[in-house]
Image (cartoon, grey):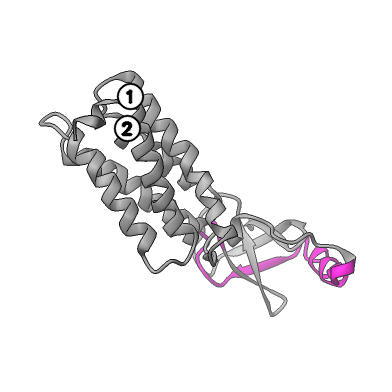
Amino acid sequence: MEILENASIGFLVVFIATLFIFGEIMVRVKGLFGILGVVIMAMYFSYHLTATASLWVVLLYAVGLILIIFDGKVTTDGTIAIVGMLLMVLGLALPAPSITYGVLVGMALVIAAPASYLFTKVFTPRNMWSKMTLKEKLTSELGYNSMNVEYKELIGKTGMTKTPFRPTGTVEVDGKLYSATTDNLWLEANKKVKIISVDGTRIVVVPES
């Protein structure tokens, strides 16, 4: 596998592997993309791992990927995903034989990760990322006027968190349950909160002082 000494080949290998790994996260393909991505990425790591850059580099990469998946399933605000992406870039760049090589494989990851979204145009997408993007415009033609009015009336009201906020969760206001967010603040259940703003159906709450 001496061909992996070439930085351009390293870029291509990491790009394709990342495309498949993130494609597995984006769409439902029964693990096929995940297997292909892991096998190709294993080729990269197995060639570049040395006594000084051992399995902890792979662990760094794996933790970064786990953080991205965690963000997509739990926090859904992208903050933890950014940290995960940085860890993955480090995991790829640190064992690289040169700075140029490291920069190229880092770029391959950064480019391929968002490019994997194109798989959703062909395959059935997963719903874990739906909370991070607004797929429909809330217009009166779609019947959202009455809903928006109801939500706007919640501003200034107090409620009780029914689930932990990480930072999204469920809050009870006037006997009704609503999905809300604290904007990066984590709260436990059964905490009194106040609604400070509403944007469409996005409700923002803060702890009641």
Disc 1: CA contacts within 10 A as few (<14), some (14-19) or many (>=20): many
Which residue appears at 83% of the width and 66% of the height? 148
On screen, residue 120 above or below 13:
below
- Position of residue 57 measured from the top left corner of the image (x, y, whole percent): 23, 38
Asked whether 92 falls inside the magenta stretch, the response is no
* Element assignment for label 2: helix
**Which sits in the foreground, 190 or 114?**
114
> What residue do we see at 80% from left, 62% from top?
138
Q: Is residue 87 visible?
A: no
Q: Amino acid at mark 2?
A: Gly
Between discs 1 and 2, the one toward the N terminus = 2
Mark 1: amino acid: Tyr
Give the residue at the far top of this rendering. Answer: 99
Location of mark 2 (residue)? 10
**Residue 125 visible, this angle:** yes
Label 1 SS = helix
Q: Quadrant of the N terminus?
A: top left
- Residue 201 image point, x, y percent: 74, 63
Q: Residue at x 85, y 63 (%)?
A: 139
Q: Position of residue 25 (x, y in %)?
A: 44, 58
Q: Read off the residue under disc 1.
A: 101
Q: Are marks 1 and 2 in contact (CB under 8 Å)?
A: yes
Please tell me whether residue 151 belongs to the stretch shown in magenta. yes
Question: Residue, x 47% and y 42% (percent of image)?
Answer: 112
Q: Quadrant of residue 84?
A: top left
> Left or right: where does residue 1 sit relative to residue 197?
left
Q: Residues within 10 Å of mark 2 (few under 14, many from 20)?
A: some
Give the magenta part as a residue range: 141-168
